[in-house]
Amino acid sequence: QVQLVESGGGLVQPGGSLRLSCAASRSISPFTMGWYRQAPGKQRELVARISKFKSTNYADSVLGRFTISRDDAKMSVYLQMNSLKPEDTAVYYCKAELQSAFSWGQGTQVTVSS
């Protein structure tokens, strides 16, 4: 089991940038790490994932705008979000996956509005 704490959310204007961080309570080296988001009235969806080998995949809606990265030495995962759009507004969650086990963070709110 690993505890995850997200930070870095907030209010930003369209076209702006934010960097989300996810800090883990233990080593994340063996885990696939992911960022997911959930907008009001919608299901939680994958934003980006990064494997322990640092291979990545992204939702089509964020490809070219968002970048996921990890620093295993700091037990942290990051999501750099550029060119933000109002439709990116959601609660963003960090997830750690290892085979059939997984852990979620509590989420951080991102609001894109003028």
Image: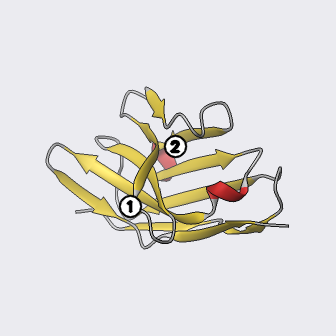
Badge 2 vs badge 1, beta-carbon distance below 8 Å = no
Q: Quadrant of the C terminus?
A: bottom right
Q: Earlier in the sequence, mark 2 or mark 1?
A: 1
Going by the numbered disc 2, the residue's amino acid type is Asp
Tell me the residue that label 1 is attached to.
43
Q: Quadrant of residue 29?
A: top left
Q: Nearer the viewer, mark 2 or mark 1?
A: 1
Going by the numbered disc 1, the residue's amino acid type is Gln
Relative placement, left or right, of 7 versus 13 is: left
Relative placement, left or right, of 37 versus 1 is: right
Badge 1 element: loop
Instruction: Please name the residue shown 38% across and 61% down the image.
Output: 43
Tell me the residue that label 2 is attached to.
71
Q: Position of residue 18 (x, y in %)?
A: 72, 56
Instruction: Please name the residue shown 64% across and 56% down the image.
Output: 87
Above-or-below relation of 50 to 76: above
Q: Position of residue 81 (x, y in %)?
A: 68, 47
Q: CA distance from mark 2 to mark 1?
A: 29 Å
Q: Residues within 10 Å of mark 1 (few under 14, many from 20)?
A: few
Instruction: Please name the residue shown 42% across and 73% down the image.
Output: 106
Q: Quadrant of the N terminus?
A: bottom left
Q: Position of residue 52 (x, y in %)?
A: 36, 34
Q: Residues within 10 Å of mark 2 (few under 14, many from 20)?
A: few
Q: Position of residue 80 (x, y in %)?
A: 66, 46
Q: Quadrant of residue 50?
A: top left
